[in-house]
Image (cartoon, grey):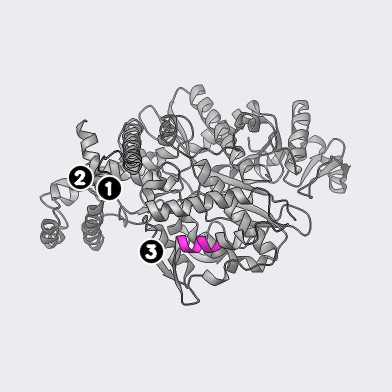
Amino acid sequence: MTDRMLGLETEYALTVLDRKGKGLNRGKAIQRLFKLARKKFSHLVAMHHRGIFLANGSLLYLDCGQHVEFATPECLDPYEVVRYQTAGDRILAGLVRDLAAEDGDISEAIFSKCNVDYAYNSRTTWGCHESYLHRGEPPEFPAQIIPHLVSRIVYTGAGGWNSVSPDLEFLLSPRVVHLVTEVSRESTHERGLFHTKDEPLSGRDYHRLHLLCGESLCSETASWLKLGTTALIVALIEAGLKPGEAIMPRSPREAMKIFACDPACRAVVRGRSGTSFTAIEMQRHYLAEVRSHLHDPFMPPWAEAVCHKWQETLDRLEEGGPESMQGTLDWAMKLALFKNHAHHSGFEWDKISRWNYALRRLRQGLDARGYEAPDAPIRAEIVLHSSTPVSQEIANLNPFMKQNGLEWDSLKRFLLMRDELFEADFRFSQIGEASIFASLDRSGLLDHRLPGADRVEEALAKPPKAGRAHLRGQVISRLAPKASGCRCDWSAILDPDSGNMLDLSDPFEEEEHWVPSPILRRRRLAMRRNLFDADIPF
Amino acid sequence: MDQRTRDRDHLLPPLEAAPGDGTPDSTHLREAQREGDRFLSAGDDAIRRALSGSSQDFLLHSRQRGGQ
């Protein structure tokens, strides 16, 4: 099979603030947001999701966990996925703008693609799930693709802070610390590096590789590389090759953490074969494997373009470090900006780890005395008060502070900067023109745009040109204005009026064939057009 | 050059490799440095605009429920 099919599901954080900056009820805001969406866009109500399928073939829904999620239509190449993801961002940016405009109590409504929540003790993370259609053998996948997932973060990492640590610790991929096991079946608990769920959403013979460990990105090039490189490795595995076998780390999760903590991209991990390698070396191994099959019939036509950018990215990271990619990769942009912000706040980057050490000691002291909830933010006014509960720790730390040129007077400023850096990450990935990323993009200083992923205006309303998403989009455009009771799913559209079903179980279906649906025929007698209304929450 | 631009100098690659002798390499390095400078300056402005209130309050009130 030379045809590839892939897509993204993006989870968005929603923040709604009133005129005093206090959080408003998010559940009510989401309800209103979906009502606005139903007014604004041609759609059919989704059958098995709390949401709507749009005329561009995508799905906008409320996922478990009560977050808004956008799933691109099934796309045939990574350019198309990036285009539809950008369209999804614009759709949500418009809706949240409308929401704020119609409610005078709202001062600010924000969707963000920030991957982690920095609110105290939150431990919330939002995913950007990838789906790759294949006809390979699912049990073969973990061993061959895990080394890729571990090491690709040198270009797919969103960048951000470790949100489960009391330290201020920059990570190439902040979601890494939320992955608690290597392989899992669960998506919300025991989140695994590799997810074994195989829900094909298609007919027989198809499987869907569903990856949970990725992150939402702002850079078009980084998103495209993430999808393109992974799809090519899927193609190799599907063809029966074993591209990851020689480079499986002894402990994949540990390896991923080590790579995530190393912006220089020079950290080395030990492989099961006894050899050690850097993340860039692991990626070069995969690149060589793909290149050696570049002209095989199972390779898609865009493989060469991906390999070219893949190599250029690895070369630049290795030779020029993160600075060489600060206009292109999300994590490298954030690293440069956050370092600069820390410097202007009076803190040199290399001293942050020393502040972390002092804060850990204070934290231990506060915890030992049961002073505050574990992991609660440390407050300078308590720690430095004349009757401080951690006087002993402060006394013990004084020599360390002096030796490292740190002053207690700066503690409050350090904690303030820490909160600012957390908010800056959230605001970097905010959807719409007010984000830090959008502001940088407007200044013309970024090099992330992807020729071939443009025509976003078209993608707002029209489906991809081929595949079942094309049919789905056409049918939605035709039926939605009639206010029909049709219901939509990834693999079918049901029409309760006629009792017919459009079968989309073949992901590459090109023609519209409606067939009688035995289930509908039985149920329509009793329920008529109210068939699925009980499932509509909006 | 304002104070913030001067402050940023420590973040940039050392200039020893670009003695300004007019060779293509030194010109390229200087251009890269200027571009890096512009990037940081634009980012600094963007962060200042984005962080208009108390970050502590913002984090508290934007607290979220989980995704996957």
Q: Main secondary structure of the magenta part?
A: helix
Establish if A302 lies above or below A363: above
**Residue A445, percent from left and from top:** 41, 34
* Chain for numbered disc 3: A
Distance from Cα at disc 3 to Cα at disc 1: 26 Å
Name the one closer to the observer, A34 or A263. Answer: A263
* Region rendered in magenta: A280-286
Foreground label between 1 and 2: 1
Foreground label between 3 and 2: 3
Distance from Cα at disc 1 to Cα at disc 2: 39 Å
Distance from Cα at disc 3 to Cα at disc 2: 33 Å
Q: Which residue is mark 3?
A: A267
Is residue A156 in sight in this rendering? no
User: Position of A446 compared to A34: left or right?
Assistant: left
* Chain for numbered disc 2: A
**Residue A204, percent from left and from top:** 79, 58
Q: Amino acid at mark 1?
A: Ala
Residue A381 in magenta?
no
**Residue A303, percent from left and from top:** 63, 51
In what quadrant of the picture does the N terminus of chain A appear? bottom right
In what quadrant of the picture does the C terminus of chain A appear? top right
Q: Amino acid at mark 3?
A: Ala
Are dots 3 and 2 on a single chain?
yes
Q: Which residue is mark 2?
A: A412
Tag 1's secondary structure? helix
Are dots 3 and 1 on a single chain?
no
